[in-house]
Image: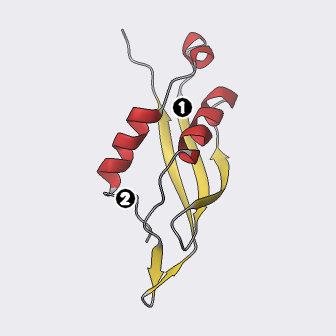
Amino acid sequence: MPEFPGGAGNFGLFLSRNIRYPISARDGNSQGKVIVGFVIEVDGSLSDLRIIQGAGTDLNEEALRVMKLSPKWLPGMQSGRPVRVAYSVPINFTLSRE
């Protein structure tokens, strides 16, 4: 299976450092899970980014924006050779109760 550089913990750190909760979504109290689908190419780059499950236009756009910033992943391997892999990740948008 493909892997984000440094593993799942680094992926979470990447998301937390790069996601900017859209002001309109915050003002409208919009929350939810966005599932982003994409293909990890043999060189580790991401292609064919798309929303599989959305949570509103602003949150969907922010999830896609951040995934487009992603560094190259470690590609999936099959029989010792890198292969293209379809993959999806959930990105949760939750407002704190401050």
Q: Quadrant of residue 26?
A: top right
Per the image, label 1 sits on a secondary structure element best described as strand
Residues 95 and 47: in front is 47
Q: Which mark is residue 68?
A: none
Using the image as rendered, state which of residue 92 and residue 11 is in the foreground. 11
Quickly name the residue at label 2.
5
Report the disc number at residue 32.
Answer: 1
49 to 20, vertically: above or below: below
Question: Which residue appears at 58% of the width and 74% of the height?
Answer: 84
Rendered residue at 60%/38% (across/down) = 65
Left or right of 67 in this view: 58: right
Image position of 65 with respect to 48: above or below: above
Which element carries disc 2, helix, strand or loop? Answer: loop
Amino acid bearing label 2: Pro
- Point out residue 56 in the picture as x, y percentages from the top left corner: 66, 29
Which amino acid is tagged 1? Gly
Residue 14 drawn at (x, y percent): 39, 42
Q: Is residue 84 above or below residue 68?
A: below
Q: Position of residue 67 (x, y in %)?
A: 55, 46
Q: Quadrant of the C terminus?
A: top left
Left/right of residue 10 with respect to residue 49 in the rendered view: left
Query: Which residue is located at x 47 percent, y 53 percent?
Result: 71
